[in-house]
Amino acid sequence: MEKIEVMISELELDKRIQEIASQIKKDFEGEEVVFCSVLKGAIFFTVDLMKKYDGICELDCVRVSSYEGENSTGNITLKIPLKKEHVEGKNLILVEDIVDTGRTFDYLVKYVKELNPKAVKTCVLLDKKARRVVPFEADYVGFSIDDLFVVGYGLDYNEKYRNLPYIGYVKN
Ligand code: IMP
Ligand code: MG
């Protein structure tokens, strides 16, 4: 059984997510947006972000996978695609739990652009800059974190710990 230490508390998450929701609202004043959650990890973040977003918005989901255990396989596969009619002409905000190597976002941004959105923005709760393989900067970043394997608030370790209400790290 792994030991989990708290890295970012529920209260800190709540405060930062409110700031991001307000920033997105300002950036898209007078426009509608679609929050596109990258399943499964970003579900918790997307739900809380949308509840704090004081504007007209829609929800969509896309699913990709690249990870097994603690290691990225480097191979991104699209498990649940988006429908072109749900993206075309819309302001799409891709919402992810974490950017690590950058491969997932690199893949997703290219994929989504082919569906002719009006605009694409990227929003990520956690950014592990030290691990980048593909250069990538998200438009909205919750927290920059050190190179530790984190779990909770949607993030898993072999599918476990997604239900923790905070971000924790696996203590070795
Ligand atoms: P990237 O393609 O390497 O940027 O990886 C992004 C995906 O890897 C995320 O959506 C997560 O599902 C997973 N991931 C990366 N780092 C962690 C971590 O520390 N804990 C849990 N999942 C992670
Ligand atoms: Mg993910």
Image (cartoon, grey):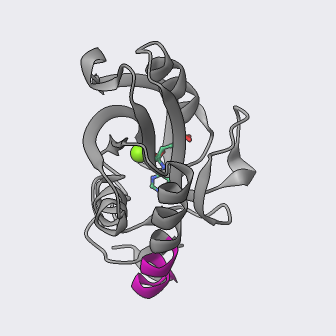
Q: Position of residue 134 (x, y in %)?
A: 69, 31
Q: Position of residue 127 (x, y in %)?
A: 62, 56
Horizontal side, residue 94 vs residue 63: left or right:
right
Q: Position of residue 152 (x, y in %)?
A: 37, 68
Picture mark count: 0
The one of 131 and 30 positioned closer to us in this rendering: 30
Q: Residue at x 46, y 84 (%)?
A: 9
Magenta region's main secondary structure?
helix
What segment is highlighted magenta in the picture?
7-16
Q: Position of residue 28 (x, y in %)?
A: 50, 48
Q: Residue at x 42, y 35 (%)?
A: 92
Q: Inspect the magenta stretch and tell me whether residue 11 lies in it.
A: yes
Determine the quadrant in which ligand 2 lies: top left
The one of 27 and 153 positioned closer to us in this rendering: 27
Q: Is residue 92 above or below residue 70?
A: above
**On-image quarter of the C terminus:** bottom right
**On-image quarter of the N terminus:** bottom left
Horizontal side, residue 27 vs residue 56: left or right:
right
Q: Residue furthest top?
A: 114
Q: Residue furthest front?
A: 30
Q: Inspect the magenta stretch and tell me whether residue 17 lies in it.
A: no
Q: Residue at x 74, y 52 (%)?
A: 130
The one of 18 and 143 positioned closer to us in this rendering: 18
Q: Residue at x 46, y 70 (%)?
A: 17
- The picture quadrant where one finds residue 157 is bottom left
Q: Is residue 11 above or below residue 152?
A: below
